[in-house]
Structure formats: structure tokens, C-alpha cells
Image: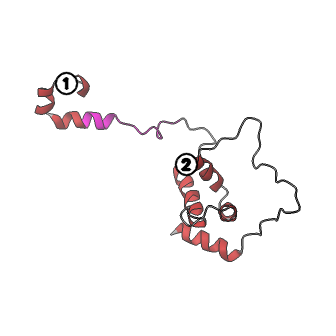
Amino acid sequence: MLPYDAMADELQRDIESYVDAVYGSLESQFLVLPRGSAFVEYARFQAAYEVLKRATSAFRELRPAAVWDALLVDSMAIVVLRCILACRLPSGRSWPPPIPASPSHKATPALSTRKRAQIQSTSRA
């Protein structure tokens, strides 16, 4: 008998078997998602998440330079950031958006070898 069809007295007599039946039927929605060739496995996503987390001081310093540093270490960090922000590009738009040409625009300096090593070492810890 399904636990949802049981009467109160039946549940009281054998609650453990009903709990086991309900618990056994539960599935994570993440586990039943369709998995195509572009699906990112959890371990890979988690590694990129940790890189982004370290580069942004646990997301307290979410500055373009900090995000850029994370991207130079692990390009998957952009997927993590987009998932966190729940952002979706409008149809027909490309990523990254074009950088406006203006005299005030300064190129972001390349990530130093020391900074890259720091982010990589702390993300492995």
C-alpha cells in the first residue's frame, strides 16, 4: 500500500516502513535532468565555483578585475557566475558583449603569475 493511501492507524503500527517507502521514492531533480554533450558535471562546476569564490574573496569583492582573474584561471567561472546571477542572454546576442571603444577605456592588466598561482593553490585546498 502506498503511504499516501494508508489510514492513521496503519501508519502508527508500521511508520518505519512507510517512511522508508517515501524516502526511497524521492529523487533529486538534478539527478533526473537530461544530460546532453554540453552538460557540466557537478565536480567540474564545483571546481570553477571554488576558483571564482577565491578570486572574489567569497563573493564579497565581485569586481570586474577579480572576476577576470578567476576567468584566467578557469574559464568555466563565467558559467558559474551566470548561474548565480540567473542571467540569460537575449536571443541574437553574443557573449562577451563588445567593449565600447572610448579613450577612457583601459585594458585590464594580465593576471600576474603570482596571483594566478595563489588562486589555483587556494582552490585546490
Q: Which residue corresponds to mark 2?
A: 41
Mark 2, residues whose alpha carbon is within 10 Å: few (<14), some, or many (≥20)?
A: few
Left or right: residue 15 versus residue 122 is left
Q: Is residue 82 left or right of residue 10?
A: right
Q: Secondary structure at mark 1?
A: loop
**Viewer-closest of 47 and 109:** 109
Q: Which residue is mark 1?
A: 6
Visual colour scheme: secondary structure
Q: Which image quarter: residue 111?
A: bottom right
Amino acid type of disc 2? Answer: Glu
Q: Does 115 sit left or right of 30 as displayed?
A: right
Magenta part of the protein: which range? 20-33
Nearer-the-camera pick, 67 or 101: 101
Q: Is residue 6 above or below residue 57?
A: above
User: Which amino acid type is marked by label 1?
Assistant: Ala
Circle nearer the viewer, 2 or 1: 1
Is 84 located above or below residue 17 in the figure? below
Query: Nearer the N terminus, badge 2 or badge 1?
Result: 1
- Residue that appears at 68% across and 60% down: 71
